[in-house]
Image (cartoon, grey):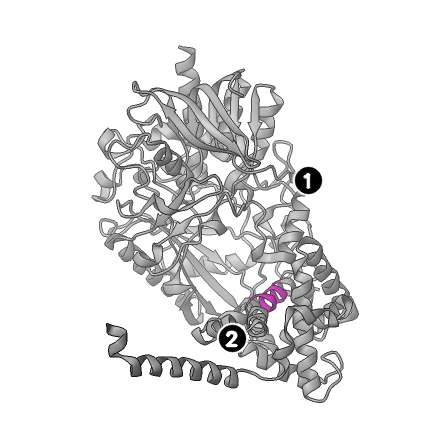
Amino acid sequence: MASHGHPSRRKFLIVTAIGGVIAALALAPKGRLRLLVPARLPDVSSQSALTTATLFIGALFAHELTSEDSADLLQRLRETIELESARARDYQVLAQYLDQAAHSSGADSFAAATAALRNHILGELMRVNPGTHFAHLLSRLSAGRREYYRMRASTVPALAWLYRRSSIPWRARGYRRPPGVPDDWRDYLTAGSRQS
Amino acid sequence: MAADRYELCIIGAGIAGALLAVTAARQGRKVLLVEAGNRFPLEGRRQLLRRYDTLGGLYVPWQHPGRDRYVDSSGQSIGYPYELERYRAKGVGGSTLHWGGRAQRLMPSDFRTASTYGLGTDWPLSYDELEPYYCAAEWEIGVSGSPHTLQAPRSRDFPMPGFPFSPDERMWLPIAQKMDIELYSAPFAINSMPYAGRTSCKAYSACNICPSGARYCADIHVAEAEKTGNCVLLTETVARRIDLNASGTVTRIHATTLDGRDLEVQADRYVIAAHGVESARLLLLSKCGNHSDQVGRNFMEHPFIKAAGYVPTRQFYPDVVGFERLESMSFYEGKDRQKRGAFKLEFEFSYDPLRDMEFDHLWGDALARHDQKLFGHWLGINVETEMQGNADSRVTLDSKAKDMFGDPVPHLRIAFCDTDIRTQRRALQVATELLQAAGAQDIRPIGPNGLSFPAHHMGTCRMSKDPDAGVVDRDCRVHGTSNLYVVGSSVYPTGGGCNPTLTIAALSLRLADHLLQSNAS
């Protein structure tokens, strides 16, 4: 009986829901996300995806990586894939996103982009908040959006962890022996003993 | 398995189970050790560390998603979830696989808080009775320490000298003196010199998975027990039910391996040493020892209250050795103790500003500047506070969620009482005053309300003289049973403000004495 009593309310709710979805899709970042569909991912070879991921780490921490740093990060990224094969896909999604973002701004790829453009792309991604209701709603509606928010919520923090737990930031801070490398414990009795 | 009969069946191969097993096995007793997790031998730890460094928080080697499910509703009572899975370690060695190594005794007053301060409950056991076992535990696991008047009294020296203060830590000495606070070097189960066939600390600065073996892990004692030929270890085998007959005697334990084989285990005596959550859960699943509805209640943690500040005028050297030694028990007792619990101060310099990326929404140049500014200029104080046992802070069986075997998973709900809140407020006040005295700027609590948890699970099978007030008696025997025991931090009536592991070890050695003597007689 109640359903006969409120046809206009139901219509209003349906129209509002459809409008909300259209508005959400219209407001969400455009273009580059449309291609983040799993079936199309093999566009980016795994090696170039890893290289792009190391460049992204460099931008994330504003760290000009030496060739030694890059080699270290590449090795660690490969290890993560050996331990968890799903990581390869995460890196491919990220690389594809970064390359598309660079391309839409006139660069051939993220690797070929200027430092300023890389920072711009980084900022766009880092300002995304995947924890909002809006993000959850969009994730349910579109596989591409789901990938996008997952990239921000999971892949980016995982790359940040990888860098933080490597010896690279410690070297940048002047430690000649970073955590993870053994020595005599008495070393700590001298201030700055680990500094170069 | 049903054909084999053991003198002692121990559930859990953490430090409590390991010490009990090795003590019994050394005396020729036939022991079966049942462990839900796997072995993580020393030779593989460097690789474990590397995996942790690359895979990060997503990789916790001792977790098993089907076995270790749980439900937490602590958010309803304290406002924050409790991440049990990050904190407990199921494996040979138990929590000592990833502990920090702090090996502190409880204070004598912790055993009689009700009669001394009108708070909590008294243990049916005194500090003096446990003291010889504390000494034995320190020598078994190897503790490096420097005696201090503020620590609990001792009848025997530490087996190894303590770790001296670093230049950074010495900075606190004049400040503390002005504030009438005494500092000492904390005792650690980390070798300051070669001990018991293990190396001295190699300063990996990665103590959560010590690759050198300098930090004690209980798998050492499990291995020794096995070597005697008197101890059989079953790994990846989950104890699921205890059969208790009408006269209060356990007749067998039912277990299932992770690959699905059901086992029945028979022994003369049974000891549950499965930590604060699973010990209670096994009793609840088996409907054992819960005649007074006490099993699972009084769950206690050591709420950590953390504050930190920025010190531009000094340069510190974080993470040089991996553990920080400076402690104070000056606020453990005191004139306001009838209104609040005990607490202990720990002083920190190790802090990675880069981890603020997510918390403070920093990246790129801003994150680099943040690191440049704060790294080596950060002072932190952790206050390990006492939590009172209360009936509403408890482990129950969840009514819906099941583990891989179809058994109800533990449902955890931590609840604070007014005394806990007063303790935490006082702790934050002390930490803030100290940081101000050290010249720190921008002092702030770390974490929600400055609160975090160090994974000390205590109290769910409380020891009591009166069977209606607890689960086990002073000998750790489950009230109303003849051959079922619980040992570990789950039996603590109070938890004090000191790390629980050494007391677990002491209680285990005391239980071993009790079982071996009564068996002999």
* Residue A188 % position (x, y): 61, 54
Residue B110 lies in what quarter of the image?
top left
* Residue B112 % position (x, y): 27, 37
Residue B220 lies in what quarter of the image?
top right
What kind of residue is marked 1? Glu
A33 or B145, which is in the foreground? A33
Residue B325 versus residue A158 in the image, above or below: above
Compared across the picture, whether A50 is left or right of B396 comes to right
Compared across the picture, whether B382 is left or right of B462 comes to right
> Are labels 1 and 2 on one chain?
yes
Query: What residue do we see at 60% from left, 75% from top?
Result: B368
* Residue B215 % position (x, y): 58, 42
Task: Report crowding for label 2: few under 14, some 14 to 19, many 20 or more residues within 10 A (C-alpha).
Answer: few
Query: What residue do we see at 59% from left, 40% from top?
Result: B191
A168 or A101, which is in the foreground? A101
| Residue B411 is a magenta residue | no
Task: Name the disc covering residue B361, or none.
Answer: 2
- Which residues make up the magenta segment? A154-161
Q: Main secondary structure of the magenta part?
A: helix
Q: Quadrant of the N terminus of chain A?
A: bottom left
Taking the image as drawn, is residue B381 in sight? yes
Compared across the picture, whether A67 is left or right of B196 comes to right
